[in-house]
Image (cartoon, helix red, strand yellow):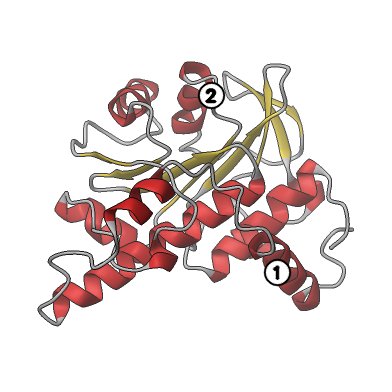
Amino acid sequence: MPELTLRQEVVVLARALWREGWNDHLAGHITVALGDGTLYANPWLLTWEELRPADILRIDLDGVVIEGDWPVPPGIPLHLEAHKVRQDVTWAVHNHPLCATVWADIGECPPVLDQSSALGGGVLALVNEYSGPVNDPASARRAIEAMGSASLALLAGHGAFVIGGSARAVHQRCVALEQRCQRSLLARAIGGGARSLLPESFTNAMVQSDGEGFVGFWEAAVRAELRADPHLLG
């Protein structure tokens, strides 16, 4: 695949995750820390499937637009608080994928029933209180604090939040999380899924993964988006 700028990575990630069900209309935010107290972020008023590199905003940690011609997404305080509180947050993704949101709605973390659902690793936390929408900085801060050191979270009555060290890592984690939620939901619907048949040693090892190990998965997603829109990077 071609070398990508950070702006291009944000766009390809958004497009790829839209295909994977992270596609609740205008909802959803992706941020990446630039190391100077500013972030790249997708704008409000564009869906992830129509995003292009020129649309990407650069904002500060107060949510003020430094570069770009679009407004900041309303729910950006969740990301701002994550980047302020946790120094390990480089990439952050939030949206309302269907199956993850269902588990968040019922206040449960689904089990890992198969190996694909474990790929990407990271601890999944349940933020089991809805203290208000995350466009409120105080509510956003409480959600981040409740998440602790986890890399993935289900937000009660809301959706999912995933962090990682690269586009590759958050892409893998987001895909695996929705697969985990989907397959567990289906297993429960047919009366199964009470326990995983995977060896505990495997699932424990996957939890420790940083999401960087499955080389080829991200590259395949990039190629798919470039086939679908050959002019995407322009």
Considering depth in this image, is 99 or 23 the residue closer to the camera?
99
Where is residue 205 drawn, in percent x and y? Answer: 41, 47
Where is residue 72 drawn, in percent x and y? Answer: 60, 36
Q: Quadrant for the N terminus, please.
A: bottom right
Considering depth in this image, is 115 or 166 the residue closer to the camera?
115
Q: As displayed, is residue 112 above or below residue 39?
A: below
Q: As displayed, is residue 74 above or below residue 24?
A: above
Instruction: Count neighbours of disc 1 (C-alpha within 10 A) and say few if under 14, some if 14 to 19, many if 20 or more.
Output: few
Q: What residue type is labelled 1?
A: Ala
Q: Quadrant for the C terminus, please.
A: bottom right
Q: Residue at x 42, y 50 (%)?
A: 206
Residue 161 position by quadrant: top left
Look at mark 2 in the image and give the residue it sits on.
83
> Which callout, 1 or 2, points to the residue nearer the camera?
1
Q: Can residue 24 be seen in this view?
A: no
Q: Which residue is drawn at 12% across and 66% down?
A: 194
Where is residue 85 drawn, in percent x and y? Answer: 46, 17
Give the total number of marks visible in the rendering. Answer: 2
**Horizontal arrangement in the rendering, residue 72 relative to residue 231 (left or right):** left
Look at mark 1 in the image and give the residue it sits on.
220
C-alpha gap between disc 1 and disc 2: 29 Å
